[in-house]
């Protein structure tokens, strides 16, 4: 069993993150403009406040966030790096305010202020407000990226845990799968031992069927994939072997369209279901019955039905409804395909039971 590493999702491009951050900054600038307008009590200046706020705030945050993404784009930054980032904010605030004011005045068609007009309390307070806004937006962006990274790490850890759990389950099911064949083989050899003295001809037929069955399943038990044609050949050999043992009490019919013979599937998936039908359905029934295995493709899915005319779910032993055969197959499908596959056990009419197995249709070359 090989353990494949789960690849980490690629980091989003810096430009895409920068544009997303800038969009958030622009929203914050509009909110700040509305708040300022409400504070000063001059609603007629709302448009001007929004224009100047967007020009100044977008430029200031663009400088700060661009520097952050270029030089300090990491989950955790040191105190010295934080101080450097604050220094960029302190430098960006006056530059962005002066440049943004010129941009805003140009948009509004006003005469822009000169550099000599800047050393006044009003300008200084606006530069301070610019600094606080870009600092707040930068902290918000940092926390948002940190939360995004934490969520991604949790999702990745959950994905790895699910993969490990699935591989462990596959290993357990492989072990159980390996135990099915020796169990059946020992029972067959015990029957052969008794038949050799009582009915040599029947013992010879059973031995021929056993050889055919082993040929059909030898490669499948050592492989992780097989074809539906090989699986049906193995079940035909197995049912032939059981027919020699049960005589006229067992008949079977297999129906496999030629187009589905090369469909891929996990090996030995049908045998537990067929064994379940014989052991719990047909063997306890005095007159025996029939097993039918039919495969068909439907809406991109492979559907295989194993039907018997045995005792059915009501009259069969209690283990029939939740026996090892059905539960093992269900767990194997869940481990391999997740929710894309399933197995359903239901009563058949007029008697017996039917197991409907559904899995994704896979074609092999």
Image (cartoon, grey):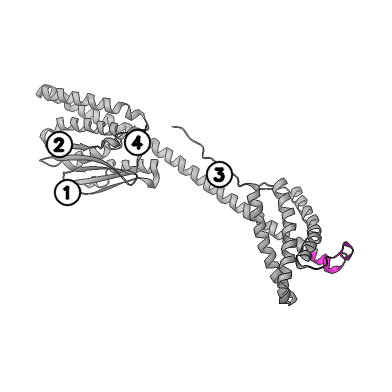
Question: Residue at coordinates 71% horizontally, 63% vertically from top-left?
Answer: 54
Badge 2 marks a residue whose secondary structure is strand
Residue 71 numbered tag: none
Badge 4 marks a residue whose secondary structure is loop
Which residue is labeled 4 in the image? 266
Q: Does residue 114 belong to the magenta stretch? A: yes
Is tag 4's residue or tag 2's residue first in the polypeptide sequence? Answer: 2
| Front in this rendered view, residue 112 or 90 | 112
| Front in this rendered view, residue 75 or 363 | 363
Q: Does residue 15 belong to the magenta stretch? A: no
Residue 251 numbered tag: 2
Q: Position of residue 247 (x, y in %)?
A: 12, 32
Is tag 4's residue or tag 3's residue first in the polypeptide sequence? Answer: 3
Q: Main secondary structure of the magenta part?
A: helix
Which residue is labeled 1 in the image? 315
What range of the chain is rendered magenta? 112-126
Left or right, residue 182 beside residue 38: left
Q: Position of residue 283 (x, y in %)?
A: 16, 39
Q: Residue most toward the bottom?
A: 41
Question: Residue at coordinates 56% horizontally, 47% vertically from top-left?
Answer: 153
Which residue is labeled 3 in the image? 9
Q: Residues within 10 Å of mark 3 (few under 14, many from 20)?
A: few
Real-space CA distance between mark 4 and mark 3, rounded to the nearest whole angstrom = 29 Å
**Callouts 4 and 2 close, C-beta under 8 Å:** no
| Front in this rendered view, residue 340 or 142 | 340
**Callouts 3 and 1 close, C-beta under 8 Å:** no
């Amino acid at each position: 069993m090989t353990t494949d590493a789960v690849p980490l999702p690629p980091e989003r491009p810096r430009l895409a993150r920068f544009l997303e951050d800038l969009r958030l900054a622009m929203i914050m600038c509009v909110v700040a403009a509305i708040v300022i307008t409400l504070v000063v009590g001059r609603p007629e200046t709302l448009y001007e406040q929004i224009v100047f706020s967007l020009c100044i705030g977008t430029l200031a945050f663009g400088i700060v966030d661009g520097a952050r993404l270029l030089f300090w784009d990491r989950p955790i930054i040191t105190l010295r790096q934080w101080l450097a980032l604050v220094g960029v904010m302190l430098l960006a605030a006056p530059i962005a305010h002066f440049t943004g004011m010129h941009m805003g005045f140009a948009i509004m068609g006003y005469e822009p202020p000169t550099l000599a007009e800047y050393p006044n309390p009003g300008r200084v307070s606006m530069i301070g407000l610019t600094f606080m806004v870009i600092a707040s937006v930068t902290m918000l962006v940092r926390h948002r990226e940190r939360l995004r990274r934490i969520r991604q790490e949790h999702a990745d850890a959950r994905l790895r845990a699910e993969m490990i759990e699935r591989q462990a389950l596959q290993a357990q099911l492989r072990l159980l799968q390996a135990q099915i064949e020796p169990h059946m083989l020992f029972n067959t050899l015990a029957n052969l031992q008794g038949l050799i003295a009582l009915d040599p001809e029947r013992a010879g037929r059973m031995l021929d069927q056993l050889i055919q069955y082993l040929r059909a399943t030898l490669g499948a038990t050592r492989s992780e994939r097989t074809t539906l044609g090989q699986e049906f050949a193995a079940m035909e050999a197995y049912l032939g072997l059981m027919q020699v043992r049960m005589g006229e009490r067992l008949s079977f019919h297999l129906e496999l369209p030629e187009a589905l013979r090369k469909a891929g599937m996990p090996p030995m998936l049908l045998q537990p279901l067929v064994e379940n039908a014989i052991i719990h359905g047909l063997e306890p029934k005095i007159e025996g019955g029939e097993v039918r295995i039919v495969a068909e493709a439907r809406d991109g899915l492979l559907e295989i039905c194993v039907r018997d005319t045995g005792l059915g779910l009501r009259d069969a032993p209690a283990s029939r409804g939740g026996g090892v055969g059905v539960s093992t197959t269900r767990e194997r499908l869940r481990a391999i395909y997740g929710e894309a596959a399933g197995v359903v056990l239901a009563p058949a009419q007029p008697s017996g039971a039917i197991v409907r197995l559904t899995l994704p249709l896979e074609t092999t070359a």
